[in-house]
């Protein structure tokens, strides 16, 4: 009896594993092709594991600027062409790229994505209709004009500028922002023509 029970359990386990489906990530050839463009260097800025954020802000209508993850020196002349994020809610969001204006009193908007609503909860990816140019000192940010969609993780020593004031173009006052230790589940992809070293 024990032998038959063992065989039954073994077969049930094998059937369960076989029916479990393919655990490899979904292949998106259009997305993947963006990262193998000949003559282009492609890199990313932002969080690697987008699933590690666990808290939604209860402040409606916030503008967020990530001071921790900035574009590396040498990225100027490149452009942001895509972004991905983890959504916990289906509320409108917009990517922004900003930098401090010369006086340091203002934050200048370099470019922005269209306002979008996440397609679903979980990981979302978007290719920008218009790439955003990168200048020296650029930072990425996020506008959540209603309730929050993208969660954050509270990390000691992390630096994110946040304001509940409405998003303004082309400048926002630096003193309207407060510093928080909130790391949002967001990253951007940028590209730059490879330099000819010959």
Image (cartoon, grey):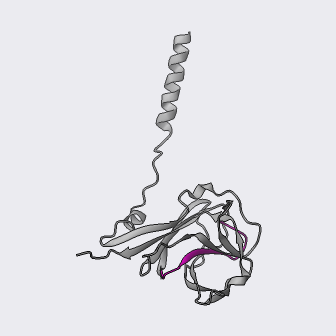
Task: Tell me residue 143's x, y (percent).
Answer: 65, 76
What residue appears at the point 41 percent right and 81 percent down from the top-left corner? Answer: 77
Residue at position x 42%, y 60% in the image: 28
Residue 108 visible in the shown view: yes
Magenta-drawn stretch contains 147 = yes
Q: How many marks?
A: 0
Look at the image and tell me in which quarter the N terminus lies: top right
Q: Is residue 21 above or below residue 50?
A: above
Q: Quadrant of residue 54?
A: bottom right
Residue located 52% across and 20% down the image: 8
Q: Is residue 44 above or below residue 178?
A: above
Relative horizontal placement of residue 57, taking residue 18 as reference (left or right): right
Picture coordinates of residue 14 (x, y %)? 48, 29
Is 194 colored magenta in this rendering?
Answer: no
In the rendered view of the protein, which quadrant contains the C terminus? Answer: bottom left
Q: Which residues are magenta?
A: 133-151
Image spot of residue 51 (x, y percent): 60, 55
Q: Residue furthest top?
A: 1
Measured as percent of width and height from the top left, residue 111 is found at 54, 83
Task: Decide: is 2 above or below 53.
Answer: above
- Is residue 44 rendered to the left or right of residue 143? left
Judge by depth and name the residue closer to the eye, 118 or 174: 174
Residue found at the very far left of the displayed protein: 198
Residue at 63%, 86% in the rendered image: 104
Horizontally, residue 146 falls left or right of residue 66, namely right
Which secondary structure type mostly characterizes the magenta part of the structure?
loop
> Is residue 166 visible from the viewing direction of this image?
no
């Amino acid at each position: 009896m024990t032998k038959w029970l063992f065989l039954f359990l073994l077969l049930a386990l094998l059937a369960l594993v076989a029916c479990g489906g393919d655990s490899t990530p979904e292949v998106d050839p259009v997305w993947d092709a963006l990262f193998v463009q000949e003559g282009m260097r492609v890199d990313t800025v932002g969080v690697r594991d987008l699933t590690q954020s666990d808290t939604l802000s209860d402040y409606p209508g916030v503008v967020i600027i990530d001071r921790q993850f900035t574009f590396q020196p040498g990225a100027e002349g490149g452009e942001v062409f895509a972004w991905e994020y983890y959504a916990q809610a289906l509320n409108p969001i917009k990517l922004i790229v900003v930098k401090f204006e010369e006086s340091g009193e203002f934050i200048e908007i370099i470019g922005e994505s269209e306002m979008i609503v996440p397609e679903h909860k979980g990981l979302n990816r978007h290719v920008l209709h218009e790439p955003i140019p990168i200048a020296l000192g650029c930072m990425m940010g996020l506008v959540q004009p209603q309730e929050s969609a993208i969660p954050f993780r509270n990390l000691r020593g992390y630096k994110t500028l946040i304001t509940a004031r409405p998003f303004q173009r082309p400048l926002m006052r630096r003193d309207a922002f407060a510093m928080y230790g909130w790391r949002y589940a967001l990253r951007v992809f940028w590209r730059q023509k490879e330099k000819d070293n010959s």
